[in-house]
Amino acid sequence: MPDHLSTSFRTVWINGMYHDDPRQISVFDKITLGMGVFTTLLASRDATGFMNLHFWDAHYARLCRHAAVLDIGVPYSAEDLGSVAQCIAGHTAHATQSDFCAVRVQITAGDGARGLAYPATPTVFVTAASVPDPATLAPVRVMIARDISLYSQDIMTRIKSNYAVRALARRRAEQAGFHDVILRNEHGNMTSASVGSIVVRMGQDFFTPPLADGVLDGIRRGEGIKSGKWQEKSLTEADFLCCDAAWVVNSLGIKPIICIDTVPKRSEPAE
């Protein structure tokens, strides 16, 4: 069972140990080659000071699924990692005087020799940072990327791993004056924002692109589909531009989209 924090604020937990200094990952860790996956979840503090991990079981299950795609085993149980995540979140919230934290759990193939060979032991680390109240998230203006695509058959588009392409696309959108970017697949269908699923309202119905289009299995996305509020449907660029309303959805909240390229949209709840 991982040890727990006592009184001082620690910033990172790596393979069973807490550290004050977050700069602990070796330059020889396979994270430098993109051989790793992660999950980011919301933690919120209740009136008693207890930190609630939102949809932790779903996040842990997805972390294991995505790690398995890269043939990486997760050496800690949901209970153990959940305990660490709560501890890190609690101390981060206390140190930053925040009621909300983003907790990241990441696993890599491990620290080893130069090259592509898998080390014997994976690296698992947990960090947290304060974030705004999800209820206060501002609407966003998005741009459709036309020079960068996500390929639907690429396994890396369906797991939370290397986000370099997403980061580049978002950087270009921000340089053009937008908050975020919407990426298409090789067929021109919409997939996702840089770090979130997309949901649109068309009439009375709410749609989100299917996994087969090269979409990440977002936790909030999955909950919306499970509840029956949202349906899966491939969305063309015309569908997206002509929808009645749209949102970027991830584990840290739901942001209304108020403009797609130059097309204004209404800001309304995603219900």
Image (cartoon, rainbow, N blue to C red):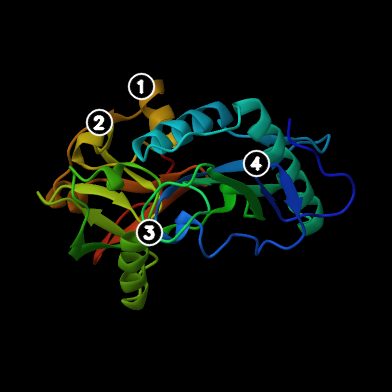
Q: Amino acid at mark 4?
A: Ala
| Foreground of the two, 60 or 265 | 60
Q: Amino acid at mark 1?
A: Gly
Residues at discs 4 and 1 in contact (Cβ within 8 Å)? no
Q: Earlier in the sequence, mark 4 or mark 1?
A: 4
Q: CA distance from mark 2 to mark 3?
A: 40 Å
Mark number for residue 153?
Answer: none
In this view, 194 is above or below 122: below
Kind of element beneath mark 4: strand
In this view, 97 is above or below 123: below
Residue 50 image position (x, y, % from top left): 78, 35
Residue 90 location, quadrant = top right
Q: Residue at x 39, y 22 (%)?
A: 226
Q: Which residue is mark 1?
A: 228
Q: CA distance from mark 3 to mark 1?
A: 46 Å
Foreground tag (4 vs 2): 4
Residue at the bottom extreme of this rendering: 175
Residue 15 image position (x, y, % from top left): 65, 44
Q: Residues within 10 Å of mark 2 (few under 14, many from 20)?
A: some
Q: Quadrant of the C terminus?
A: top left
Q: Earlier in the sequence, mark 4 or mark 2?
A: 4
Foreground tag (4 vs 1): 4
Residue 35 relative to residue 183: left or right: right
Residues at discs 2 and 3 in contact (Cβ within 8 Å)? no
Q: Quadrant of the N terminus?
A: top right
Residues at discs 4 and 2 in contact (Cβ within 8 Å)? no
Q: CA distance from mark 2 to mark 1?
A: 10 Å
Q: Amino acid at mark 2?
A: Glu
Residue 4 location, quadrant = top right
